[in-house]
Image (cartoon, grey):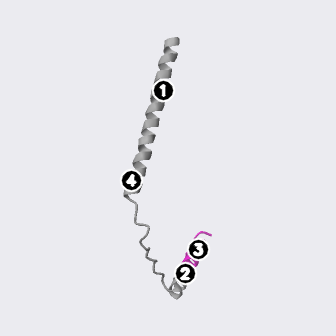
C-alpha cells in the first residue's frame, strides 16, 4: 500500500512538473513571437476612408426594403 502511494505521488509530481515546464516554455515562446511580430508604434496609422453618408443611407434603406419584402413573403407563404 505504501509503495502504491509513493508511486502515485511520483507520477503526480512528474505530471505537474511537466505541465509547469510546458506552460513556462509556451509563455516564453509567445513573448518572443510578440516581440518579433511587433509593428513600429511610431509610424502613423492610416485612417480608413469612409464612404459618403448618402450612399450608406441609401444602402441601408435598400436593406430594410429587402428584409421587409422577405418577411412579408415568408408570412404570406406560411399562414
Q: Residue 66, percent across and down? A: 54, 79
Q: Is residue 71 left or right of residue 49?
A: right
Location of residue 52 with respect to 14 vertically, above or below: below
Q: Find disc 3 in the rendering and name its residue.
A: 71
Lower sequence index among marks 4 and 3? 4
Q: Residue 11, percent across and down? A: 46, 24
Query: Quadrant where the C terminus lies?
Result: bottom right
Lower sequence index among marks 1 and 3? 1
Q: Find disc 2 in the rendering and name its residue.
A: 60
Q: Find disc 4 in the rendering and name its residue.
A: 33
* Residue occupying image coordinates x 43% and y 76%: 46
Q: Is residue 65 left or right of residue 46?
A: right
Q: Find disc 1 in the rendering and name its residue.
A: 13
Location of residue 9 with respect to 23 vertically, above or below: above
Q: Is residue 42 left or right of residue 53?
A: left
Nearer mark to the viewer, of 2 and 1: 1
Q: Is 38 covered by the magenta stretch?
A: no
**In terms of secondary structure, where does tag 3 sit?**
helix
Residues at circles 4 and 3 in contact by the CB criterion of under 8 Å = no
Amino acid at each position: 500500500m505504501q509503495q502504491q502511494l509513493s508511486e502515485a505521488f511520483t507520477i503526480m509530481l512528474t505530471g505537474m512538473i511537466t505541465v509547469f515546464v510546458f506552460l513556462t516554455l509556451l509563455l516564453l515562446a509567445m513573448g518572443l513571437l510578440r516581440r518579433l511580430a511587433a509593428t513600429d508604434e511610431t509610424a502613423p496609422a492610416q485612417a480608413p476612408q469612409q464612404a459618403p453618408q448618402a450612399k450608406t443611407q441609401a444602402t441601408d434603406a435598400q436593406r430594410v426594403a429587402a428584409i421587409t419584402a422577405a418577411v412579408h413573403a415568408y408570412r404570406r407563404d406560411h399562414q
